[in-house]
Image: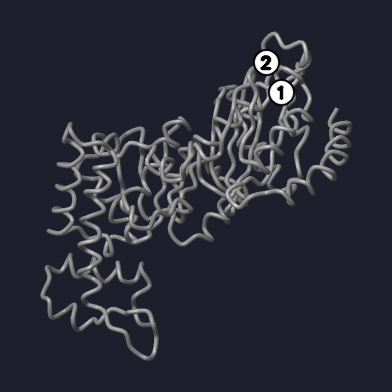
Amino acid sequence: MAARRGGAERAEGGRCGARGRKMAEPETQLLLGVGLIEKDTNGDALWVWCYPSVTAELRTLLLRKCCLTDESKLLHTFVFGQYKRTWFYITTVEVQDSPALKKVTHFSIVLTAKDFNPEKYAAFTRILCRIYLKYGSPVKMMESYIAVLTKGICQSEENGSFLSKDFDARKAYLAGSIKDIVSQFGMETVILYTALMLKKRVVVYHPRIEAIQEFTRTLPALVWHRQDWSILHSYVHLNEEEVEALKACTGYIAGFTDSEVNSRPDLYDVYVNLADSEITISPVVKEAMTMGKLHKEIGQLIVQSAEDPDKSDSQVIKDISLKTKEILSTLASLTEVSDGSEKPTLNSEALKQKRFPPATENFLFHLAAAEQMLKI
């Protein structure tokens, strides 16, 4: 089966791949590939098809992320994450009453892309799943994939329509709930805020992948001024290659469902046990993360804003962002441009002369380091 499909993939791939590249518009240059994993009636989960191609390393990773290879037998309808700047989105369905797939019990559709947009790719994979359930052939799926790749749209009365433009990146950034995080952690949310402002390594543990994904995807919104979701690694296994790839990043938010991560202090500066609502600061960053009057102010502002029933999540993000801007403009006022360099650097003397409380001065100094504003 795999060999037959591989042949189809090459024949179709050669012809459609060229067409896809020629007609592609900039906004549709985000898709990287599509893959199919099947679980047959013998209980074997196999990678059976992909377009245009996938490296052996990425294929091994995607098989690990796909719940069909998981011994727990739990079905996760949709998971997402990233590995070395490639985002992956996996939708899994159980096969029921499909004459086209008699020997298949479950299958997963995998999309890889350059952008973070779970809602967009969940919608597209659902359509691809419906097509595969109906026809049992990857060729039909590939037609829809090519249509989205080249035109940003695929339409069908029976399987549903998909339009890339409907899924704005900003919507994806705002899809999580900051209010939920604050209702769980209260004033301690300021620890998460500080860690992210200082580009520290945040590890989040929960046994349920869905809880991890919902929580971690929201955290980058605490530092909205950066609008950087590349720091998010929402589904990581304690696997050597994955751990090494994670360690190569400076600051990150990483989600794990394996409680063993607790005994890996080399991976985190801040450890969040989401299941027990506990946040632990590693001794390594205790000094940089010292909390003071400024942190208390920020914490109170976050809690007050999040507890206001008239405020939406995006308004809470805006309130936090305004406070961040205030802090950044204070920092900017303490910088100078010197040595012909265009980038302003922190004037340590000016910082000392301000006579801020020690914890505030310490935070501003470490923030300048995170923003690359220190003289080397």
**Residue at 77 percent of width and 18 percent of height:** 42
Q: Which residue is mark 2?
A: 95
307 or 236, which lies in front? 307
Disc assigned to residue 132: 1
* Disc marking residue 209: none
- Amino acid type of disc 1? Tyr
Q: Are marks 1 and 2 in contact (CB under 8 Å)?
A: no
Q: Where's the N terminus, which quadrant?
A: top right
Question: Quadrant of the image for the C terminus?
Answer: bottom left
Q: In the rendering, at what x and y percent does residue 117 appear?
A: 50, 41
Residue 231 screen position, x and y as percent: 46, 53
- Which one is closest to the eye, mark 1 or mark 2? 1
Locate residue 49, reporting x and y percent. Answer: 77, 34
Q: Position of residue 342 (x, y in %)?
A: 38, 82
Q: Which amino acid type is marked by label 2?
A: Val
Query: Image height check: is 38 above or below 355?
Result: above
